[in-house]
Image (spheres, rainbow, N blue to C red):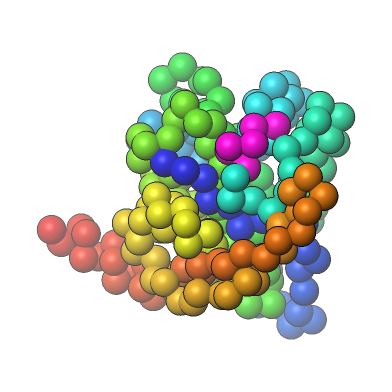
């Protein structure tokens, strides 16, 4: 399973002056939404003990193949870890980056994230996995968990995800989770690799809360 990650350069989220459903529920979700469990995985906030995991993820050129930035050095990885931990102290928090651990042994295998746009009640989800854990359907399991979390815990209206059209395994994982392909955005993404700028296409997938509710009901009825 190759990686999918919609994160760019942490663009500023627009916050509406009108309190919406996501904003009203964010504080109540703050404590209970810090950990997500699936059949095989635990998603949890990063801690200061996770430098090795962060560095292994963000220093691997192949893991970052479909992201717009270069691999990080140790100093950059340490700075990123500090930002990630600080994000969890926002009130409300709009950027949630989780470490992904195997439930059976606690080994870190990647990261997952939710970026929340309060104005549109939308959560953008994504994941990066160490290469050893590709092609094991972990990304599908992570997407399912993040989508469920966004709707049932954060009470969002819409969840979306983006990936490169070349990243077939990623968009197939999104489709397995009931997400619709909404757009092919031509040369939307500005990649800077080794100082060289290039422009790349991007696929956008999404699912609405109403669609998720109908899908869950359908799956339960089988």
* Residue 63 belongs to magenta span: yes
Residue furthest left as drawn:
222
Observer able to see residue 143: yes
Establish if 205 lies above or below 30: below
Pick the front one: 45 or 65: 65
Residue at 37% from the left image edge and 37% from the top image edge: 135
**Image x and y of residue 200, in percent:** 62, 64
Establish if 166 lies above or below 48: below
Residue at 56% from the left image edge and 42% from the top image edge: 128
Establish if 28 lies above or below 33: below
Q: Main secondary structure of the magenta part?
A: loop
**Image x and y of residue 93, in percent:** 73, 55
**Image x and y of residue 186, in percent:** 58, 75
The N terminus lies in quadrant: top left
Q: Is residue 146 left or right of residue 62?
A: left
Residue furthest front as drawn:
196
Q: Is residue 104 left or right of residue 66?
A: left
Pick the front one: 98 or 88: 98
Tally of numbered discs: 0
Residue at 47% from the left image edge and 43% from the top image edge: 2
Q: Quadrant of residue 216?
A: bottom left
**Image x and y of residue 203, in percent:** 50, 67
* Residue 45 belongs to magenta span: no
Observer able to see residue 93: no
Residue at 34% from the left image edge and 68% from the top image edge: 213
The magenta stretch is: 59-64
Pick the front one: 219 or 183: 183
The C terminus lies in quadrant: bottom left
């Amino acid at each position: 399973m190759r990686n999918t990650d919609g994160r760019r350069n942490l663009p500023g989220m627009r916050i509406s002056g009108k309190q919406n459903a996501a904003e009203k529920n964010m504080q109540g979700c703050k404590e209970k939404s810090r950990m997500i469990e699936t059949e095989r995985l635990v998603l949890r906030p990063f801690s200061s003990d996770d430098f090795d995991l962060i560095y292994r993820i963000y220093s691997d050129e192949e893991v970052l193949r479909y992201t717009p930035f270069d691999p990080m050095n140790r100093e950059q990885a340490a700075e990123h870890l500090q930002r990630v931990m600080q994000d969890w102290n926002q009130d409300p928090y709009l950027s949630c980056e989780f470490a992904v651990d195997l439930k059976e042994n606690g080994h870190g295998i990647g990261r997952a994230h939710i970026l929340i746009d309060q104005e549109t009640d939308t959560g953008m989800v994504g994941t990066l996995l160490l290469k050893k854990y590709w092609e094991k359907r972990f990304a599908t399991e992570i997407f399912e968990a993040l989508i469920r979390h966004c709707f049932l815990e954060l009470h969002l209206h819409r969840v979306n995800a983006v990936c490169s059209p070349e990243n077939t395994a990623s968009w197939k994982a999104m489709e397995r989770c009931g997400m619709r392909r909404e757009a092919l955005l031509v040369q939307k993404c500005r990649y800077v690799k080794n100082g060289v700028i290039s422009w790349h296409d991007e696929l956008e997938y999404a699912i609405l809360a109403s669609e998720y509710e109908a899908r869950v009901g359908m799956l339960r009825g089988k």
